[in-house]
Amino acid sequence: MSAVNRRLLALDHDIAQRRSPRVVLFLRAERAVVLARLGETTRARTEIASLRAEPGAREYPSLEPWLLLGEGLADFYADLAGSARERVRRALVQARSTRSTRALPLAAAWLAHLEFHVREDIRAVEALVLALNTAQADHHGARSRLCLVLAGMLHYAGAEERAQPWYSQARVHAQAEGDGAALSSIMYNMALLRVVDVRLTAAFGAHTDAAALRRAMLGTESSIFLDRSVSTRALSHHPPMQQAQLLVLAGQPAEALALYDAYTAQAVAEGLTSCEALFLADQAWCLIQLGRGSQALDRARVADSALPAATEPEDRAIAHAMLAQVHARLGLQDLADRHTRLAMQDHQRYRQRADTLLALLDHADLPPPGQV
C-alpha cells in the first residue's frame, strides 16, 4: 500500500473514530490539504466548501487557516496560480491571530515555497526561518516541507552537495508521516533542479556532463514512477517536459519532439507558461537535427515571441542559447550573435540571484539538517 494511501487512510480512520465534532472538522480540513497536494483539486475544494457550510465551523476560528491553506494549495497544484501565494499568506496571518500551533509552521513552510517560486527570496528565507522556529518536533508535515524548500534553494543556487542532507531530512519526515505526496514532491524537485543544472552546464560549460545527464534522466524516470505509485495527479505533465529536455541533450531529437508534441499544451495549462519559450526553442533545435530547416525557423520565431513571458533567468538563458544554435545552423549569424549575447546576460542574472540566495541562507544561521 502506498504512503499516500496510508496517510489518507489514517485520516479517514481518525475521522470515523472521533466523536468530537470539533476534532472531526479539523481532521477533514487536514485531509483537504492532502488532497490538494495530490492534485485532487476538485475533491479538495468540495470538502473545503462543505466545511465552510458546516453550522459549527464558525465557532472555531483556528479552522480558517487550514481552509485557506487548502484553497491555496489547490490553486497552486492546479496550474501554479498566482492566487495561491495570497491565500497561503492569509492562512499564515490567520494562524498567528488564532494561535494555531500546527497550522502556523505548515503555512509558513508553504509560504516559503511559494515566495521562492516567484523569486521573492528575502521573504522566502524569512518564512522559512519562521517555520523552523515554530514547527514542533513531531510536526512532520511542516518539517518535511521546510527541509525540502531549503534543499531546493541550495540546489538551485548550485550547491547540490549542501542540499542533499536537507533532501534526506525531508524524506525522513515524509516517511514518518506516511506522506507519499511529500515523497513525490521531494523527488520531483530534485529531478527538476538536476535538469536545470545539466542544461546550464551544456549551454555555458565546456561540454555536456554525460554522468550528470544520466543521473538527471534516472531522477526524472524515478519521479514519474513515484508519482504513479502514490497516485498523485499534481502537475503530472511537468515530468515529461523534463524528459524531453534531457533527450535534446542526449541527441535524440525525434524522441524529444514526440514528447513535446504530446505534452507541451497540457504542461503550459498546468502553469509552465514561463517555460514555453524554452520548450519551443528545443523543438526548433530538434527540427534542425531532423533536417526540417523551414519548420525549425518558424518554431524559432514563435519561441522568440514567447520569450517575454519567460520569467526565470535560467530558462531565458537556456532558450537564448538554443536559439543561437538554431540560427547559426540556418546561416543567420546576426541573429545567432544576438541570442548568444542575450543568453550570456540572462545567465549572469541567474548567477547573481544564486549568489545572493546563498548569502541570505548563510546569514540566516540555520541549524544542521539533523537537528530539524
Image: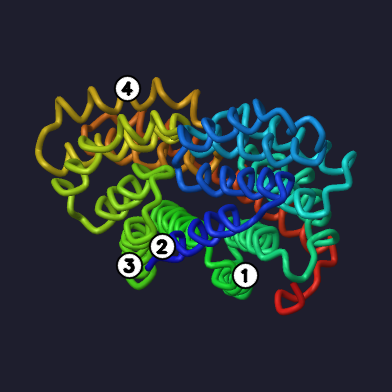
Mark 3 or mark 4: whose residue is earlier in sequence: 3
Q: Tell me which amino acid carries mark 1.
A: His
> Quick one: quadrant of the N terminus?
bottom left
Inspect the image, locate mark 3, and give the three-letter code of the amino acid beneath it: Leu
Which label sits in the foreground, 1 or 2? 1
Q: Amino acid at mark 4?
A: Val
Q: Secondary structure at mark 1?
A: helix
- Mark 1, Cα crowd under 10 Å, few <14 / some 14-19 / many 20+, is many
How far apart marks 4 and 1 lie (CA) works out to 44 Å
Camera-side residue: 185 or 325?
185
Of tags 3 and 2, the one toward the viewer is 3
The residue type indicated by label 2 comes to: Ala
The residue that label 1 is drawn on is: 173
Residue 302 disc label? 4
Q: How many angstroms separate mark 3 from mark 4 (CA)?
A: 31 Å
- The residue identified by callout 2 is 206
Q: Position of residue 185 (x, y in %)?
A: 50, 56
Residue 108, percent from left and from top: 75, 48
Q: Residues within 10 Å of mark 3 (few under 14, many from 20)?
A: few
Whether residues under marks 4 and 1 lie with C-beta atoms below 8 angstroms apart, the answer is no
Q: Nearer the viewer, residue 80 or 106?
A: 106
Precedes in sequence: disc 4 or disc 2: 2
Marks 3/4 in contact by CB < 8 Å: the verdict is no
Seen in the picture, residue 294 relative to 175 is either above or below; the reply is above
Q: Tell me the mark number nearer the camera, choosing from 4 and 2.
A: 4
Q: CA distance from mark 3 to mark 1?
A: 24 Å
| SS of the residue under disc 4 | helix
Marking on residue 218: 3
Query: What residue is at 36 percent from the left and 36 percent from the top?
Result: 267
Sequence-first tag of 3 and 1: 1
